[in-house]
Image: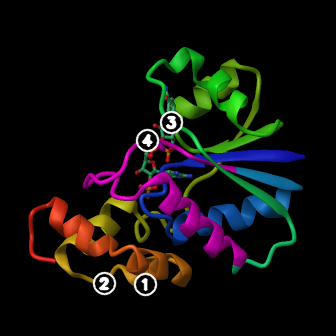
Amino acid sequence: MRGFFIGRFQPYHFGHHEVIRRILEEVDELIIGIGSAQESHTLENPFTAGERILMISKAIEELNTGKRIYIVPLEDIYRNSLWVSHVRSMVPPFEVVYSNNPLVIRLFREAGFKVISTKLYRRFEYQGTEIRKRMLNGEDWESLVPRAVAEVIKEIDGIGRIREIANRDA
Ligand code: NAP
């Protein structure tokens, strides 16, 4: 069975990592969709689709799962009724969808897919918004993401980018 899981991953953190680790126990192969792929260089969406591919693929390598994983960037199309078709046209075929986003769940169920609701692991602790805020304010963010993700963010000077976008000293 091939599963599909989508998120914006701005950035990829331990909450996503644990959800994916658990999904991988249930599926033979997993497609990870990188949502809002066209977005980058904003405070809400600082990282490009390519940078998010790096973060996720390197972090997942450390899970040492023997399973095949496809990471596919997906641009928004601003027409919800066509979105599932758009996704299906861009990724390998899949049978089951994992999500906790009410809109994503609704759209895939209407299209006849089996959808499994996945709550993020330790949500109070791991949140994209909080991590981006900490990056901006010079607080500890590295403990909230896999080591490989922190390395990618440093490699691309992600903190400098966020602080410049916010017009603060890097
Ligand atoms: P999102 O809008 O990026 O995330 C919304 C919130 O849900 C974030 O706070 C996120 O936390 C949180 N979250 C993500 N996964 C979760 C989970 N398993 N359990 C609990 N909370 C979770 O939405 P998304 O679901 O991560 O990604 C959906 C993507 O599909 C988006 O990029 C969206 O634009 C796209 N989409 C596009 C269309 C269209 O183009 N018409 C339609 C539907 C969806 P973190 O910030 O910590 O990740």
What is the CA distance from the residue labelled 1 to the residue labelled 2?
7 Å
- The residue lying at 54 percent from left, 69 percent from top is 55
Q: Residues within 10 Å of mark 2 (few under 14, many from 20)?
A: few
Residue 5 position within the rendered picture, expressed as x and y whole percent measured from the top left: 66, 48
- The first of marks 1 and 3 along the sequence is 3
Task: Please tell me whether mark 1 or mark 3 is closer to you in this view.
Answer: 3
Relative placement, left or right, of 45 versus 78 is: left
Could you say whether the residue bearing mark 2 is in a helix, strand or loop? loop
Left or right relative to 138: residue 61: right
Q: Which mark is residue 75?
A: 3
Residue stretch in magenta: 32-61
- The answer to whether residue 77 is above or below residue 131 is above
Q: CA distance from mark 1 to mark 4?
A: 28 Å
Residues packed near mark 1 inside 10 Å, few (<14), some (14 to 19) or many (20 plus) = few
Q: Secondary structure at mark 4?
A: loop
Q: Amino acid at mark 3?
A: Glu
